[in-house]
Image (spheres, rainbow, N blue to C red):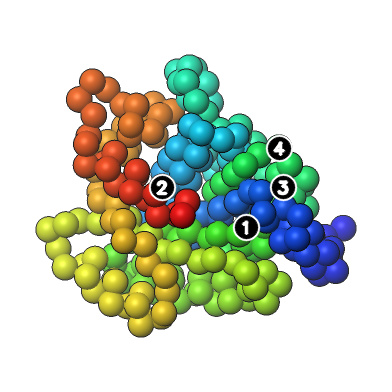
């Protein structure tokens, strides 16, 4: 049974014995359509290039698992080990899967749920992909309340915000950035723009570094910059 006592004991174990050897990333947002799964699968795949990486699909829609299935059919050279867990199992079962992996990436469902909250308890680092609209700002307010609750049990949780699906022709990103800074959030310098290359890559079970002969150099640069920032 998953109790607050069990959570506390697990977190103590994680930070004393596990935290020195691995990083667990939770990619979360309570709003859909922000590129959460795209962010998670790219991060997990890039990390797997050098170290053994686990990708946990914690979204009931199982988009990351679908991507992994397409990837197996494509026989790409490096891939994260992928499994599906939902709800409280992300913490209760996920903590038992961490051993043997240098990194774990959790793609949590796009709404407030037991799965999202469990992912925040499991993680060392929470990555919040966020768009630049007023709706995204409203959703962030709700999510930040959940994050603060998670920090009562996981005080070392490192929260980082990634601006995604940015339209460089508008001022929306600058306005969202002002809002995020007002919330005293750690916003990554990387900006991920709205690009066809990301949709194409996901549909092929790939990442943007692997798609087609004429690769999108800008998309590749964004993802590599993102990796460099979060893996510091």
Q: CA distance from mark 2 to mark 4?
A: 21 Å
Q: For the residues labelled 4 and 3, say whether their Cβ atoms are less than 8 Å apart.
A: no
Give the image location of residue 121, x and y in percent: 67, 62
Q: Residues within 10 Å of mark 3 (few under 14, many from 20)?
A: many
Residue 227: assigned label: 2
**Residue located 29% across and 52% down the image:** 192
Q: Nearer the viewer, mark 1 or mark 2?
A: 2
Q: For the residues labelled 2 and 3, say whether their Cβ atoms are less than 8 Å apart.
A: no
Does the rendering let one see residue 222? yes
In what element is the residue under mark 1?
loop
Q: CA distance from mark 1 to mark 2?
A: 17 Å
Residue that badge 1 annotates:
123
Q: CA distance from mark 3 to mark 1?
A: 10 Å
**Residue located 31% across and 26% down the image:** 211
Q: Tell me if residue 172 comes above or below residue 93 in the rendering.
A: below
**Residue located 56% across and 35% down the image:** 51
Please indicate whether residue 115 sits to the left or right of residue 172 in the image: right
Residue that badge 4 annotates:
100
Residue 94: assigned label: 3
Does the rendering let one see residue 89? no
Give the image location of residue 100, x and y in percent: 71, 37
Q: To which quarter of the image does residue 52 belong?
A: top right
Q: CA distance from mark 2 to mark 3?
A: 23 Å
């Amino acid at each position: 049974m998953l109790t607050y006592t069990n959570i506390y004991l697990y977190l103590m174990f994680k930070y004393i014995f596990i935290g020195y050897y691995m990083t667990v990333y939770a990619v979360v947002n309570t709003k859909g359509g922000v590129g959460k799964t795209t962010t998670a699968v790219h991060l997990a795949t890039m990390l797997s290039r050098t170290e053994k990486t686990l990708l946990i699909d914690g979204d009931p829609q199982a988009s990351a698992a679908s991507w992994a299935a397409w990837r197996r059919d494509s026989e790409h050279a490096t891939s994260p080990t992928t499994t599906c867990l939902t709800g409280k199992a992300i913490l209760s079962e996920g903590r038992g899967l961490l051993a043997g992996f240098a990194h774990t990436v959790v793609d949590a469902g796009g709404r407030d749920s037991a799965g999202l909250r469990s992912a925040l308890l499991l993680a060392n680092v929470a990555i919040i992909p966020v768009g630049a609209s007023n709706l995204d700002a409203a959703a962030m307010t709700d999510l930040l309340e959940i994050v603060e609750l998670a920090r009562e049990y996981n005080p070392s949780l490192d929260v980082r915000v990634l601006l995604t699906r940015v339209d460089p022709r508008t001022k929306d990103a600058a306005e969202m950035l002002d809002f995020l800074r007002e919330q005293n959030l750690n916003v990554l310098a990387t900006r991920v723009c709205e690009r066809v290359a990301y949709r194409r890559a996901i549909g092929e079970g790939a990442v943007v570094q692997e798609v087609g002969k004429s690769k999108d150099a800008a998309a590749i640069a964004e993802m590599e910059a993102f990796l460099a920032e979060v893996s510091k």
